[in-house]
Amino acid sequence: MNVLTVNDLHLDYGSGASANPILKGVSMHLQRGEVVALLGPSGSGKTTLLRAVAGLESPKAGTIDIGERRVFDGARKLELPAEERNLGLVFQSYALWPHKTVADNVAYGLKLRRMGSSEIAAKVKEVLAQLGLGHLGERFPHQLSGGQQQRVAIARALVYNPPVILLDEPLSNLDAKLREEARAFLRELIVRLGLSALMVTHDQAEAMAISDRILLLNNGKIEQQGTPQSMYEAPDTLFTAEFMGSNNRLPAQVVQRSGAGARVRVEGRELNATVRSMDAAADAKALIRVEEVRIGRTPVDNGIQLPLSTCMYLGDRWECLFKSGESSVRAYSKGRIDPGNYWLEMPAEKLWVF
């Protein structure tokens, strides 16, 4: 069952001739117990879509349904205010009241709903315990770490059991190490409580780790959607392939094509490749993930030879850059390698042509 349905949503900033279209006919759905990540570069429309669902932005056309209840209908001029949509919101800044305790911050929404004090206390105690905050109820936000503040913001969004929780860049204020820990915590929490969540992020690793499905937005439209694995391993477009991973992009000329297979000329050598875009032109773009390039000293059939330029230590591996003139290829190695020329093998099924 869908807990959220968006159909053909259009939203502009400004009006008349100066109108700037932000959402250009976006349709999506969120099923019960599912986490969908809105992913894309700055300006793609992901945050605007989230805010439109929340009732914080006014679309121009389309519909938004929460469960079986319509909250926006452009044709009928129907637009329920944010407070009547009963959605849980977690903002990038957390937006905690600095003068209220953790318990009072979490209870704030329940007090606005005029719930009884004993029921409020029970619900606050329950949600704080679920998020590992039970011992921090009487502290103030400035007495908490960034990760604890984030949990308080999530507790405040969950306390009245909303049908959908909306997360706007929920981990972006945390440092790198804490961000990884919070990512694991957030995914575990979502699964344990069976939450339905719509999350905005610009971090593809974060989207893949937390979500069940990714919607990649590009210039106000959905470029591609699917499971994290399908988006990473089977991109439909060059934009999706480049956004979803760390890649080598190579100038290539298609010299022969047969169905999904192709022969491409790269650095004067003909290589076997896989066609990912059906409208790939003769002067196509060839792309291969950095982790798929295999480094060797002996000649290979499906590869090119380049000299080593430099190596960078990443902790669990080395990232090696091979460069000659305008051509450069990055690849990973378990150890540091010596200067010299190397053969860089590119498996045909991993060398994509767009």
Image (spheres, rainbow, N blue to C red):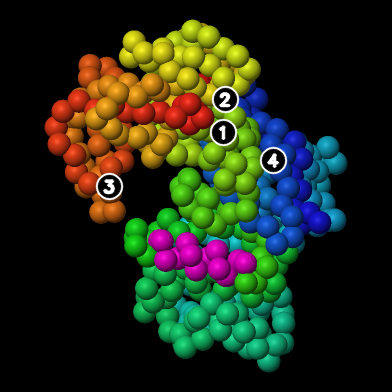
Does residue 154 show up magenta in the picture?
A: no
Give the number of the mark in front: 1 or 4: 1
Specify which label sits upstream in the sequence, 3 or 2: 2
Q: Are marks 1 and 4 in contact (CB under 8 Å)?
A: no
Residue indicated by mark 2:
276
Q: Position of residue 79 (x, y in %)?
A: 77, 49
Q: Position of residue 184 (x, y in %)?
A: 48, 65
Question: Mark 2 falls on what kind of element?
Answer: loop
Residue indicated by mark 3:
334
Q: CA distance from mark 4 to mark 2?
A: 34 Å
Q: Are marks 2 and 1 in contact (CB under 8 Å)?
A: yes
Which residue type does callout 3 highlight? Lys
Q: Are marks 3 and 2 in contact (CB under 8 Å)?
A: no
Which image quarter: residue 302?
Answer: top left
Q: CA distance from mark 1 to mark 4?
A: 30 Å
Numbered tag placed on residue 235 in the rendering: 1
Give the number of the mark in front: 3 or 1: 3
Give neighbour class at mark 1: few <14, some 14-19, many 20+ (Cα, 10 Å): many
Q: Are marks 4 and 3 in contact (CB under 8 Å)?
A: no
Q: Which residues are magenta?
A: 179-191
Specify which label sits upstream in the sequence, 4 or 3: 4
Question: Mark 1 falls on what kind of element?
Answer: loop
Placement of 67 over or under 219, stated as above or below: below
Give the number of the mark in front: 3 or 2: 3
Tell me what residue is drawn at x 70 percent, y 33 percent. 25
Does residue 185 show up magenta in the picture?
A: yes
Q: Is residue 22 visible?
A: no
Of residues 121 and 148, which is closer to you in this image? 148
Give the number of the mark in front: 4 or 2: 2
Which residue type does callout 4 highlight? Pro
Which residue type does callout 2 highlight? Arg
